[in-house]
Image (tube, rainbow, N blue to C red):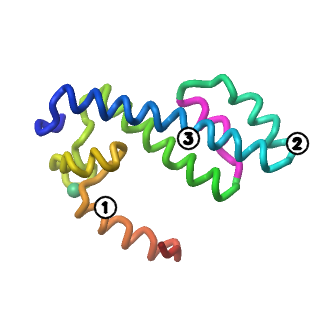
Amino acid sequence: MNRNLQNKQLESLQTAMRARQTQLREEIRQALVKSDSEHYLQIADSVRELEDESFADLIVDVGLAEIDRDLDELRAIDAALLRMADGSYGICAACDRPIDVKRLNLTPQALRCIDCQTIFERTHFQKTGHTL
Ligand SMILES: [Zn+2]
């Protein structure tokens, strides 16, 4: 666990992430509905009442860019909440150092510290040919 984080901060980060999850689920559902495809409408229907991580599992292969982006964020938040539960939250996955609390307040689901994230994005986006 990141020793720079107090229980109160953890609680408020958790609250923020849960609120964001709800918002993202709603955004995804609305995007599915808007797509006006029978298949996506069915998915939107079936995920309406889901509150846990099976939501992200159900819509794994949608292939719509705006949904995929929300889905990525939703999965990152799901994972961060799991790390909170197992005590590994707030520790950089790449260098094992505590992630800056300011960064966590901005991006609660952050998996890496800012230095490692910068390196990761540079290599990742080079490999896939994407640019920001
Ligand atoms: Zn790091």
Confirm if mark 1 falls within 8 A of ligand 1.
yes
Distance of mark 3 from mark 2, alpha carbons? 21 Å
- Residue 111 location (% of width, % of height): 32, 48
Q: In this view, does 99 lie to the left or right of 119?
A: left
Vertical relation: 114 (above or below) 88: below
Vertical relation: 26 (above or below) 70: above
Q: Identify the residue under disc 1.
A: 117
Residue at x 56% of width, y 41% of height? 24
Q: Identify the residue under disc 2.
A: 38
Dot label at residue 24 = 3
Residue type, mark 3 in image? Leu
Q: Nearer the viewer, mark 1 or mark 3?
A: 3
Front one among 91 and 109: 109
Q: Magenta includes 9?
A: no
Distance of mark 1 from mark 2, alpha carbons? 39 Å
Q: Is residue 16 left or right of residue 60?
A: left
Over which residues does the magenta segment extend? Answer: 53-62
Dot 1, how many residues are within 10 Å of its Cα: few (below 14), some (14-19), or many (20+)? some
Element at label 1: helix
Vertical relation: 123 (above or below) 85: below
Residue type, mark 2 in image? Glu
Quadrant in which residue 125 is drawn: bottom left
Distance of mark 1 from mark 3, alpha carbons? 23 Å
